[in-house]
Image (cartoon, rainbow, N blue to C red):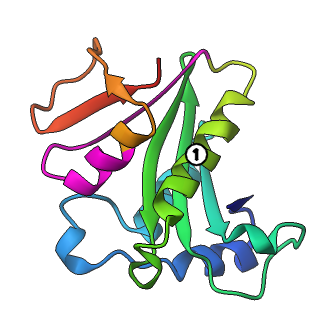
Amino acid sequence: MTLRTVTDDETRAAARIVRRPDDEAHLVADVDRSLAQCAEDAALEPLVAWDARWCGLEVPAAPAVGFAVLEARGGVGFVLRLMVAPEQRGQGYGRALLDAVVARARRVPSVEMVATSHRAENTVMASLCAAAGFTAWETPFAHDADEVYLRLP
């Protein structure tokens, strides 16, 4: 997996290719909403992802396979959003994207812990996080009973 920070019209257009199906609207915000949030908060880094074979190109010509948002705040590198284009699912891109965002978070000097969350009903994300080694995280700020908070040990 190769990641690029969404910084210009070209990477923004690439990120918008990653569409969230309407039936998943209750699980994850779409790319446009995510980009708007990132524009308002410097602690949020929007990332567009391509297959690793496109590493080395500023903006690959191939369609992006995923999108993520990394938040670095308070010593936590938080995987705020993670989505794989529906037509790219089932090929290992979800795990590769999660691993790439975790690796990026760990390179941020202020990050002491990597964490994420997902809706309790999002069984795909739950399985992905469990396979990546995330464990339950009792946070002082978790107030939504339908949200599951996880951290890497």
Q: Where is residue 83 in the image (x, y as percent from the top left)?
A: 43, 63
> How crowded is the residue under tag 1: few (<14 C-alpha within 10 Å), some, or many (20+)?
some
Above or below: residue 149 compared with residue 36 = above
> Can residue 25 be seen from the camera position used here?
yes
Which residue in the rendered view is the most extreme toward the left? 145
> Does residue 118 show up magenta in the picture?
yes
Residue designated by label 1: 99
- Residue in the picture at 58% in, 45% down: 99
Left or right for 89, reference 140: right
Q: Position of residue 82 (x, y in %)?
A: 45, 55
Q: Where is residue 144 in the image (x, y as percent from the top left)?
A: 14, 32
Left or right for 126, reference 6: left
* Number of marks in picture: 1
> Can residue 5 be seen from the camera position used here?
no
Compare residues 135 and 4 and report the one nearer the observer.
135
Left or right for 69, reference 49: left
Q: What residue type is labelled 1?
A: Asp
Which residue in the rendered view is the most extreme toward the right? 56
Q: Position of residue 117 (x, y in %)?
A: 32, 37
- Residue in the picture at 56% in, 43% down: 70
> Does residue 19 show up magenta in the picture?
no
Q: Quadrant of residue 84?
A: bottom left
- Residue in the picture at 80% in, 76% down: 59
Magenta span of residues: 112-128
Q: In which quarter of the image is residue 96?
A: bottom right
Compare residues 79 and 12 and report the one nearer the observer.
79
The secondary element bearing badge 1 is classed as helix
Left or right for 143, reference 140: left
